Amino acid sequence: MASTVFIAKETEGEPRVGGSPDTVKKIKSLGLDVVVEAGAGDSSRIPDSEFEGQGARIGSRADAATADIILKVRRPTSDEIRGYRSGAIVIAIMDPYGNEPAIAEMAAAGLTSFAMELMPRITRAQSMDVLSSQANLAGYQAVIDAAEVYDRALPMMMTAAGTVPAAKVFVMGAGVAGLQAIATARRLGAVVSATDVRPAAKEQVASLGARFIAVEDDEFKAAETAAGYAKPMSEAYQAKQAVLVAEHIAKQDIVITTALIPGRPAPKLVSRDMLKAMKPGSVAVDLAVERGGNIEGALADQIADVEGVRVIGYLNMAGRIAASASLLYAKNLVTFLETMISKESREIALKSDDELVKATMLTHGGQVVHANFGGVKEG
């Protein structure tokens, strides 16, 4: 009997879904059965009929109890966990940092769980990198939201009635989200500048037509981890950078912050004093608000008025463009899932020594197995 994959309808207001018609077709081709919870794709503009058209059965939440593999966007809630059978595989964005009790709950339920955001940044796993696929869309949406709230045009417009000046947009953090924000703001005609603590970002920023702003001293030149993430900077460097950034922010119309370091609170980049120096009606977008925020005064899921600047602190920015985000996320999931299915037997065949499994497995066999969250990794 073929193994069953259950694609869940998300709870707690998450509009994305862990499947698409294309990925259902792919899963079926791997020799697995697919059950999609009724209405799972509604918020991503995927009706049940499209899943059915690719061979899925539309079921209910109760079908999760007999599933071998459960595909989700968010870590399952306690109620959901109680509905899964011991031994089931759950693949999702688990948000494990600071949520060790929730990880332990999955272990106690006998679930084999994988955190997609822990996927190693290696060539083989590029097509499974959910942080990149979702951050890319978050960077785009940040500019769209900023443009909506800004109340002015972004491009320069020369008309018989006068000239509308181009908006000045400053992007803080030139990772995946930041680079997409730069590209989107440029497409909309803004004058764009950006900063990042990683030296490699300077060339990437310039290639998109934006100006790079940073204190380029010796510490800056060494500020990148082997995995490509930004390193925390010294207080002395942060002070020098803050002076430069404060002078620059005072001349900007829109500021977008994207700085996140895995497992740490978001670094504070923009103070109230910096916001106070901006022109009235300016806009700031904080893409790190879920980890405490980069901008002083940012409020989760709100547009806050801070020193005359409207600070956008939407949670789940990628979810605001769910129809696109779900398609990319579902592809990330199925590409990872494919590595777990034997091509010969067409059955689940987990390889404990696989570098992708080692990096992403949180719980297995009733225990937390990831060393970062209280377990001991094999190997």
Image: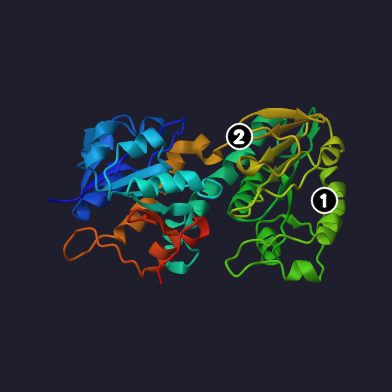
Upstream in sequence: badge 1 or badge 2: 1
Q: Locate residue 8, reporting x and y percent.
A: 33, 38
Give the distance between the C-alpha atoms of the residues marked 1 and 2, in whole angstroms.
23 Å
Question: Is residue 111 visible to the viewer in this orientation of the structure?
Answer: yes
The residue that mark 2 highlights is 314
Q: Residue at x 85, y 47 (%)?
A: 246
Q: Position of residue 109 (x, y in %)?
A: 34, 45
Q: Which one is nearer the viewer's eye here, 247 or 95?
A: 95
The type of residue carrying mark 1 is Val
Q: Indicate left or right for 227 with 216 as reference.
A: left
| Image disc number at residue 165 | none
Circle 1: element type: helix
At numbered mark 2, what does the secondary structure look like: helix, strand or loop? loop
Q: Is residue 91 visible?
A: no
Find residue 357 and report its horizontal and vertical position in percent: 38, 62
Residue at point 38% right, 32% down? Answer: 45
Residue 219 versus residue 188 in the image, above or below = below
Kind of residue indicated by mark 2 = Tyr
23 and 360: which one is in front?
Answer: 360
Eyeballing the image, is 187 above or below 126?
above
Instruction: Decide if residue 338 is on the left or right side of residue 211.
Output: left
- Could you classify mark 1 by the number of other residues whose Cα lies within 10 Å: few (under 14), some (14-19), or many (20 or more)? many
In the drawing, does residue 321 fall left or right of residue 109?
Answer: right
Q: Are marks 1 and 2 in contact (CB under 8 Å)?
A: no
Instruction: Name the residue at 68% across, 58% down.
Output: 205
Task: Name the residue carrying label 1.
Answer: 245
Q: Is residue 167 left or right of residue 228?
A: right
Residue 329 x, y percent position in the rendering: 42, 47
Please state which of residues 24 and 288 is positioned toward the viewer in this rendering. Answer: 288
Say which quarter of the image contains residue 303: top right
